[in-house]
Amino acid sequence: MVHLNKLKKAIACRACIKGVHFTYSVPPVLEIVSNLGIDFIYIDGEHGLFDLHEVESLCILAECYGMTPIARVRANTSDVITQYLDCGVKGIVVPHVDNTADARRAVDACFYPTARREIVRWRAALCAFLHERFSATSRRMQCQCFAWADDRKHQWA
């Protein structure tokens, strides 16, 4: 089943939604906050303590409870970004984006089609198998990319 990205929908509708910030994996807390009407979870892969197995487990659990998983990655590289997407993250926050080229690199990594890669994590492969139409277009419809300029001197047009 393809889960809708509540964050992307809220942005399009200019709606307010609620989320929880995780800096380490605590599945029981995720279960508890699911009863509070939380719309998304924010997995902090830059400042937090996560391995990919934990990211994937949180994504699975979040979607089971109707929450959209998004994550801040540790670096603006396609290998890091695609690993998080393959785990099931529906939104990527890219830190330390200093210019337009950095932003373009982040967006390109977020929308890199799964079908063009030779080896992917089981969740991405299963989605591609179950949904024949899973392509760059459908991934683009469910993914959200955020570029994070960390200080004022790096503002750009």
Image (cartoon, rainbow, N blue to C red):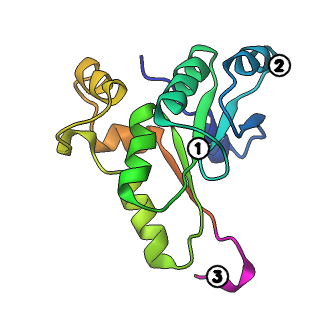
Q: Quadrant of residue 6?
A: top right
- For the question of whether residue 99 can be seen, the reply is yes
Residue appearing at x 42%, y 51% in the figure: 80
Q: Residue 154, position in %: x, y?
A: 64, 82
Q: The disc labelled 3 sits on which kind of residue?
A: His
Q: CA distance from mark 2 to mark 3?
A: 37 Å
Q: The disc labelled 2 sits on which kind of residue?
A: Leu
Q: Is residue 155 magenta?
A: yes
Element assignment for label 3 = helix
Element assignment for label 1 = strand
* Residue closest to the eye, 115 or 137: 115
Q: Is residue 86 left or right of residue 39?
A: left
Q: Quadrant of the N terminus?
A: top left
Q: Compare marks 2 and 1 and give the one earlier in the sequence.
A: 2
Question: Disc 3 marks which residue?
Answer: 154
Question: Disc 2 marks which residue?
Answer: 36
Marker disc for residue 71: 1
Tell me where the magenta segment starts and ends, as one range: 149-156
Q: The disc labelled 1 sits on which kind of residue?
A: Ala
Q: Does the residue at mark 2 contact the one at mark 3 (Cβ under 8 Å)?
A: no
Q: Residue furthest right?
A: 36
Residue appearing at x 59%, y 69% in the figure: 96
